[in-house]
Amino acid sequence: MSPERGGDITFDAGIAQREFDVERRGSYRLRNYAEQFRNEAVARLQMLFTKMGFSGARPRDVRTDIENMISSLLPGFHLRIHADGAPFYELTRLDSGGNVTKVEQLSSGESQLFTLGLDLLTVAGVWLVDQAPRRIILLDEPDLHLHPDLQQTFARFVVTLAEAYELQVVVASHSTTLLAALGFHGKGKTSVAYLSPEQPGTKAKMFDKYLAELATCLGGHALMGPLFSFPLLLVEGDDDYRIWAQACRSGKLRLSVIPSNGEEIKKHGRTLEALFSALVENHDNPSAFLLRDRDDREIDLCNVSGRHVRRMFLSCREAENLYLTNEVLAEFESDWEKARTILRESAKRFPPLQARLVGLVEADKKQSDLKGLMETLAQILDPKGGDWRLRIGQCLGRSRPTGELADFLGNQVMSAFWPVAAIASDQVSVLKPVANPIEPSRVPA
C-alpha cells in the first residue's frame, strides 16, 4: 500500500474491470506512486460483491463489516453500501447530513482514512471469498498526513480487521505514536522489528509490557509536550482516550493525550514521574496528569500526586456518566428529563437490558454503572446515531464546562484543565508535532 495515494472517490468502470485481472492489479500495487489509488478502492466494491454473488460464499456479512468498520474509523460519518448503481456507496456527514461525493469535501486525514480503510476491507473481503490460504498485507507508512489521535483510531481498525479476516499485517512506519497504538490494541499479537541499514539482519521483538511502557511514553511528540507547556494526560482505556483526544482537537485544551490499560496506568504514572524528574527542572506546574474513573473507590484526594505527575479522579463513577449530563445531551437537543421519558418508552425494545434501562431512569445518574449500556443508550437517545465518545469530547472541547458536566468532572479536573485565570486570558494554543522527538536511546534510565 503506497503512501502516495492519488485519485478521487468516484467510480471508474475501466478501473473496476481492471480489478478482476489479478496480474494487472498486482503490478499496479507494486508501484511507489498510485495515481488512481482512491478510484481503485471504490471500484473494488463492485468486484467484491460480484465475486460474492458468483461464489455464494458468505462466511461473514462483509457488507455490514464494511459499513460498521468505516463508520467506526470515521466516527463523524455514516457509510451505507448499496447495489443501486455506481459508486455503490453513500458517505454522509452526521453533523450536516450532507453526502460526500468528491475527495475535495474531505480533509487530507479523512480522505486517507476512508480510502485506505475501504481498500483494506475490500482486499480482505476478496481474499475471504476466494478462500486465499495466505493473507499478508504490507502497509507502507500509513500514518502520513494523520494526526496522532487518528493514528490511534487507524491502529484499532487494523487490529480489528486482522482478527476478523485472519490477516497478517506488516506495517512500515517511523511513527512511535502508531507503534504505541498498534501495541496497545494488538497486545500479545504484536511484534516490533527495528530496522537499521547498518545491520545485516533483524529480529522481531514481542510487544511486551516493557516495550509498551516505552512506546506509550515516547508516542510521537507526546513526551516533548510538557517541555512546551502541553502536559500529558494519561487516561484509562480506549473509550477515555477517544473522549479526551476529541476534546483536545478543538485547540482549547492544552493537553497531549495518551492511553493506558486498567491497572497498568499506575505503573505508567510512576514511569512518567521518573522520566520527568530527569528531564524537567521547573516543576511548578505538573508535567502530566493521570486521570482515572472513580468507580467504587474511597479516595484520599490529598495524597495521590507526585512532583511531576498529578493523579486525579472523576467526581462521577466513570467517563461514561458524562454522557447523561444535560450539557452533553444538549449536543443533540435533549436534556435529562426528555431522556428519562425516552428511556421509559424504549426500554422494552431491548429485553436483555430492559431492567437496567428502567432502573437508570430513577437512579443516581452520576454514580450509576453504565458499562455495557453505552451503545444502546446512544442508539436510543441520539437521533443522529452519533458516537457517544465523540459527543462527550465535542462538548468538553467547546468551552469551559458548566452545570452538571462541571459537577461530574469535579473540582480537581476543572481546576487543572480549565483554570479560571487561563480562561479569562482567552489564550488558546494548538499542539503541533515536534520536529525531532526524543529517541529511545536518549531517554535516561
Image: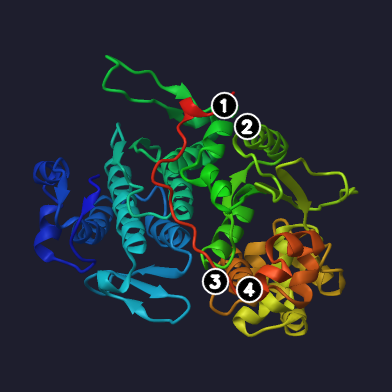
Which picture quadrant has residue 304? top right
| Residue topped by disc 1 | 444
Q: Are the residues at dot 2 and dot 1 in contact (C-beta closer than 8 Å)?
A: yes
Q: Which residue is mark 3?
A: 386
* Along the viewing direction, whichever of 418 and 26 lies nearer the viewer: 418
Instruction: Report x, y in % for residue 28.
Output: 12, 46
Looking at the image, tell me whether mark 2 or mark 1 is earlier in sequence order: 2
The structure residue drawn at horizontal position 78% and vertical position 66%, both measured from the top left corner, is 408
Above or below for 43 versus 403: above
Mark sitting earlier along the chain (4/3):
3
The kind of secondary structure element at disc 2 is helix
Q: Of the residues shown, which amino acid type is indicated by label 2?
A: Ala
Q: Nearer the viewer, mark 3 or mark 1?
A: 1
Is tag 3's residue or tag 1's residue first in the polypeptide sequence? 3
Q: Residue at x 30, y 16 (%)?
A: 199
* Residue wearing tag 2: 278
Tag 4: amino acid: Ser
Q: Earlier in the sequence, mark 1 or mark 4?
A: 4
In the image, taking residue 380 as reference, residue 140 lies left or right, namely left
Residue beneath disc 4: 425
Q: Residue at x 8, y 62 (%)?
A: 14
| Nearest the eye: 227 or 275 | 227
* Apparent side of residue 37 relative to residue 82 in the rendered image (left or right): left
Contact flag, marks 1 and 4 (Cβ < 8 Å): no
Residue contact between numbered discs 2 and 3, judged by CB atoms under 8 Å:
no
